[in-house]
Image (tube, helix red, strand yellow):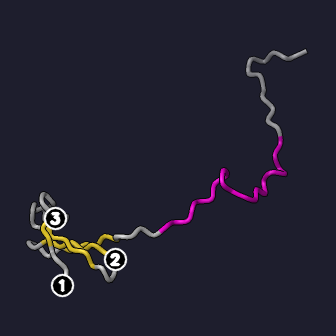
Amino acid sequence: MPIKRFIAGAVCQQCGIQDRVRAWEDEGEKLMRRECVSCGHEDVIALEVTEQPELVTRVNYTDPVFAEDVKPVRILDASGSKDS
């Protein structure tokens, strides 16, 4: 049986009453469970964070297919004067 402990200063997300939330760890499922003793509201927090794959961006992309389509940019003079 897990030890359920009250969290000092915690406010229930549902009823808003302070100091009525208790928490305990569920070792079998690697979760922290919390419950309000006033209204019965329960929530669960994962103790272990699963690693997310890195998002593919232009910086870490290993096989750029756009490299052959690169063309230089031509900057136009907005003042209207032409170079000789």
The Cα–Cα distance between marks 3 and 1, rounded to whole angstroms, is: 24 Å
Q: Nearer the viewer, mark 3 or mark 1?
A: 1
Q: Position of residue 54 (x, y in %)?
A: 57, 61
> Circle 1 sits in a helix, a strand or a loop, which is it?
loop
What's the residue type where badge 1 is placed? Met
Residue occupied by mark 1 = 1
Disc ID at residue 30: 2
Say if 57 sits above or below 79 in the image.
Answer: below
What's the residue type where badge 3 is placed? Cys
* Span shown in magenta: 51-71
Q: Horizontal placement of 70 versus 28: left or right?
A: right
Residue at (17% x, 73% y) in the render: 35
Q: Horizontal placement of 21 versus 27: left or right?
A: left
Q: Position of residue 52 (x, y in %)?
A: 51, 66
> Circle 3 sits in a helix, a strand or a loop, which is it?
loop
> Sequence order check: which comes first, mark 3 or mark 1?
1
Residue at (13% x, 57% y) in the render: 9
> Sequence order check: which comes first, mark 1 or mark 2?
1
Q: Main secondary structure of the magenta part?
A: loop
Q: Neighbour class for label 3 at 10 Å: few (<14), some, many (≥20)?
A: many
Residue 68 in magenta stretch = yes
> Sequence order check: which comes first, mark 3 or mark 2?
3
The Cα–Cα distance between marks 1 and 2, rounded to whole angstroms, is: 15 Å
Disc ID at residue 12: 3
Q: Neighbour class for label 2 at 10 Å: few (<14), some, many (≥20)?
A: few
Say if 17 sits above or below 3 in the image.
Answer: above
Q: Nearer the viewer, mark 3 or mark 2?
A: 2
